[in-house]
Every structure is written in C-alpha cells, then in structure tokens.
C-alpha cells in the first residue's frame, strides 16, 4: 500500500535538503524551523487521516494505473463520485485542521497535466502522456506532496509575457538541450511550496504562437540545483513562537505557508517535461486547473467555516448571549452561507463529465460560481463572527498579562463574562477567530484559485446568453406549441 505515515512525510522532507529562506535567513532544515512546523503539521494530518479506517473511503482511492490503494491526493479523477469524494475529503480536513492543508494545488496540477498531455499528444503526435503516466506512478507509489506552481510575477499587467522588459517575469525556457531544458523565472503564492517534495511548474495564462518558450510544464524536485524557496509572512505568524493563549490555532497554520519559488537556471530532464512549446494548449491547461481548484473552495472553506462557526457559537456561550433569538439567527445565517458554497461544490462535482483522456472534469459554470460565492461568503461569515464575538476581538489583552501577578487578577476579573469560562479560554477562542478572519485568511479566499473577476470572465464565457435570449423569445413570443387548452388570443407575430 502506497500511503506514507506522517512521520515518513516529515523524515522525507528532512532528507531533501532544499535551499530555503525564512525571515530573510537561510534555513538548513525546514523540518526543525518553528515557523514552518505548523504547515508541516497540517500536511501531516492529510497523511494521518488516510490511515484511519473510518476515513479510508474519503481519504484514499484505487489507482487506475496500478490497481493499488493510494492517497486521494495523488489520484486522477475517474468518475463524478471521485470528484464528490474529493470535496468531502476537503471538508473533513478543513474541519480537522481549521486551516489550509495545502495538497490540493498539486492534486489539481496532476489532473490538469494528465488531461493536457493526452490532448497535446492527440493534436501533435508527441509522447507526453506516457511520460506523464510514468511520473504519476512514482508520485502515487511514494505518496508525494506536490506544490502546484502557476502564478508568474507578471510584471506590468498591461503587457503579455513576451512584451515584458524583463523576460524572466514569466517562467520560460532559456536553453534547449538534447536531454532537457533550462528554465528561469519565479512563481508566486505557492501554497505548501516550502514543505513539498516536488514542484509542478505550469503556465499561468493562455499564450500566443510566438510565446513558445513560456509554454513549459514540468516537474521539478524541490532540491534541484537552482531552486530557491523564499517563505512569505502571515498575519500574526510570530505568535506561533509563543506559549499561552495568544497563538490562535496552536498546531496548524493560518493559511497555506505561501512561498515564492525562484527557478534560477534550473535544468529539467526530458522525462519530467509534459509541455514544451505547445502554446495553443496553455489556455486549456489553465482552465482545467482553475475549474477543479475553484470547486475545492466549497469544501475546504466549508470545513474551516465549520470550525469558525463553532468558535463563534462558543463565544456566545461565554458571553451568555447564546439563547438570544437574534444571535441564533446570525449563526444560522453563517451556516446558510457555508452550506450554499458546499452545495455548489458538490453540485459541480456530481455534474462532472468525461474528458478526452478519460478522467473527469467538474461542471465549469458551477465551479466558477462556487468560487465567486466564496469570495463574498467568507467575508460575510467573518463579519457575522466579528458581530457576535464583539469588540473584544480587536482589544483582547496580551496573554502575558495573565502571567504578571500584579495585573493578572484585573484581566481575569474584567474579561470573564459567563463564570463557566475563564478569561484565558475567551482569549484563546478570540485569537482563533482573529486569525481566521484576518487579512491573510480573507485575501487567500478572495484571490486563491483566481481573483473574483477571473471567475466572472469564465461565467460570461459559459453563460450562453444567446441561448437564454432564444428561450425568452420562445416563452414570451408564445411560439412553443402545447397540446393544452385553447386560449382566447393568438400570439402576436
Ligand atoms: Fe486546498 Fe483550500 Fe488550501 Fe487551496 S485553499 S490548497 S483548496 S485547502
């Protein structure tokens, strides 16, 4: 069985010896760095749950390549049921960790490359798909964690990749050799980037025929020569280094440990290249990836919101407002918004359809609608959480005040509401809400898997307005015959 244990995941990262920078300094072992530990712990949970018999159906799948049981995070979607199970897995993991668990970008990248390598071969007579299947077999056998790297720095937004003054602002091929290529550039916002085994590099935009050097999709080991990881900052991240009740989520991260990855003339051998110059397929690759990933948000943010709603409900108990009808109605409104986005994700998955390669794509209109609703509902749910938890969220005392005997009594006395809960517990829950509703968490929900306007562009493309006008013409024009009762008037011609 190809399922890593959490311990094996950690030790395999330790063995990698990547070039990583945290807080501006070179880090020898990311596994031993306290700022990275919460993110590694979160991914470790994805490995742990796959070993639990009660979660086996959701967390694992049967490989269509080998017939072996594998982690669902390395699986190619074989049916709408697989797509639905993925969303169930994300909700479970969101409920268990209360944060982003990072492995979904790699999973959707695997699926996008599986589909596009087949389509390129059909159109161009290449052999990328078999090559990709050999790579996938190893990913499944070793249960690897993959970072999906898609977002280029983009430079001046009005200019295309080939028009930038600095060509490195989009990852591109700088040298073509008989046994591979050399790539240069950077990818930004890489969820789980610093604690992945490999990086899947993909174009982040559609490309024109003359932009062949930007049409590169490949798999790069995290410890390849020339790969540099620069860890980002999150709101309140230094609190992870503290003890006490100010930490928020004590074991897991706040968002996904987003990392900038630089490719400073990295050699990629042929067997790891899955697109190399086929510009006309870049847009489809991006669309496939985006549709799967946008659907995810109904699952993962659903699980995160379950924890947030729970923390908010507990705060109302601490305040003694939990029986108030208006308070309960606001909690119900949070649930309503959360279940709406979850239902959209399940719907997009259940309505999945078969791609030419045999794997399954979600309903793309519903996928984009799911993510569009997430960009609003996560903010609205946070707003209601702030509303119910009160101004205390922005004025909570420093936990260290409770360690100073000169003032601890005052803090305890004046920050205790319901006598069943002490001030420390109130602060602990308040800090979790603070972290899950702060800039890092909300912006991630807004821009992750594409900014709101990107979904609206897709929705406009898929909306088929002419078909809707035709429907309206038929109904309002009264031209559709029916064997029913005669009416006194005839439709106007
Ligand atoms: Fe997965 Fe959600 Fe994190 Fe994206 S934001 S990697 S879908 S948990």
Image (tube, rainbow, N blue to C red):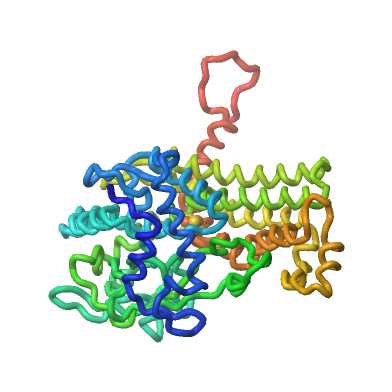
In this picture, is 92 found above or below 103?
above
The quadrant holding residue 247 is bottom right
- Which residue, as the protein is rendered here, is positioned at the far front? 405
Quarter of the picture holding the C terminus = top right
Q: Nearer the viewer, residue 238 or 364?
A: 238
- Which residue, as the protein is rendered here, is positioned at the far top? 485
| Residue drawn 33% across the image and 63% down it | 282
In this picture, is 89 found above or below 238?
above
Determine if residue 202 is in view.
no
The quadrant holding residue 149 is bottom left
| Residue drawn 42% across the image and 56% down it | 104
Please give left or right for residue 81 compared with residue 223 in the image.
right
Q: Nearer the viewer, residue 424 or 189?
A: 424
Q: Position of residue 65 (x, y in %)?
A: 22, 46
Please give left or right for residue 24 compared with residue 387 in the image.
left
Q: Position of residue 279 (x, y in %)?
A: 29, 66
**Tally of numbered discs:** 0
Q: Position of residue 75 (x, y in %)?
A: 33, 49
Please give left or right for residue 337 compared with residue 173 in the image.
right
Q: Position of residue 217 (x, y in %)?
A: 29, 66
| Residue drawn 67% across the image and 67% down it | 246
Q: Nearer the viewer, residue 285 or 4?
A: 4
Please give left or right for residue 254 compared with residue 228 in the image.
right
Determine if residue 211 is in view.
yes
In this picture, is 348 found above or below 161?
above
């Amino acid at each position: 069985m190809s399922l890593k244990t959490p311990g094996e995941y950690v030790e395999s990262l330790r063995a990698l010896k990547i070039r990583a920078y945290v807080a501006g300094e070179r880090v020898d072992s990311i596994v031993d760095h306290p700022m990275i530990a919460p993110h590694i712990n979160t991914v470790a949970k994805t490995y742990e749950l796959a070993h639990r018999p009660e979660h086996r159906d959701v967390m694992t799948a049967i490989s269509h390549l080998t017939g072996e049981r594998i982690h669902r995070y390395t699986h190619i979607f074989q049916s709408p049921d697989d797509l639905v199970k993925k969303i169930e897995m994300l909700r479970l993991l969101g409920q268990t960790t209360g944060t982003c668990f990072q492995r979904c970008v790699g999973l959707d990248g695997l699926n996008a490359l599986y589909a596009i390598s087949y389509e390129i071969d059909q159109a161009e007579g290449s052999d990328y798909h078999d090559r990709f299947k050999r790579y996938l077999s190893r990913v499944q056998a070793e249960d690897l964690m993959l970072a999906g790297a898609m977002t280029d720095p983009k430079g001046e937004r009005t200019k295309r990749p080939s028009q930038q003054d600095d060509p490195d602002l989009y990852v591109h091929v700088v040298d073509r050799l008989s046994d591979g290529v050399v790539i240069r550039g950077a990818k930004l916002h890489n969820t789980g980037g610093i604690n992945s085994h490999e990086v899947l590099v993909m174009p982040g935009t559609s490309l024109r025929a003359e932009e062949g050097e930007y049409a590169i999709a490949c798999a790069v080991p995290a410890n390849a020569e020339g790969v540099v990881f620069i860890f980002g900052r999150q709101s309140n991240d230094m609190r992870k280094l503290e003890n006490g009740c100010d930490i928020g989520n004590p074991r897991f991260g706040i968002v996904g440990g987003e990392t900038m990855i630089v490719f400073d003339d990295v050699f990629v051998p042929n067997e790891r290249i899955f697109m190399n110059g086929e510009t006309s397929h870049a847009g489809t690759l991006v669309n496939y990836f985006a549709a799967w990933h946008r659907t995810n948000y109904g699952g993962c943010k659903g699980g995160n919101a379950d924890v947030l709603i729970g923390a908010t409900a507990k705060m109302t108990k601490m305040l003694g407002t939990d029986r108030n009808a208006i308070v309960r109605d606001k909690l119900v409104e949070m649930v309503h918004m959360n279940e709406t986005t979850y239902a959209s994700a399940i719907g997009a998955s259940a309505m999945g359809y078969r791609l030419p390669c045999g794997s399954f794509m979600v309903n793309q209109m519903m996928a984009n609608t799911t993510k569009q609703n997430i960009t609003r509902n996560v903010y609205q749910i946070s707003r209601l959480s702030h509303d119910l938890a009160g101004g205390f969220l922005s004025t909570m005392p420093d936990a260290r005040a409770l360690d100073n005997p000169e003032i601890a009594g005052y803090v305890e006395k004046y920050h205790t509401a319901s006598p069943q809960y002490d001030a420390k517990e109130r602060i602990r829950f308040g800090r979790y809400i603070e972290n899950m509703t702060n800039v890092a968490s909300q912006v991630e929900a807004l821009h992750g898997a594409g900014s709101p306007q990107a979904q609206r562009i897709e929705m406009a493309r898929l909306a088929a307005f002419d078909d809707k006008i035709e429907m309206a013409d038929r109904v309002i024009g009264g031209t559709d015959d029916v064997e029913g009762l005669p009416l006194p008037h005839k439709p106007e011609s």
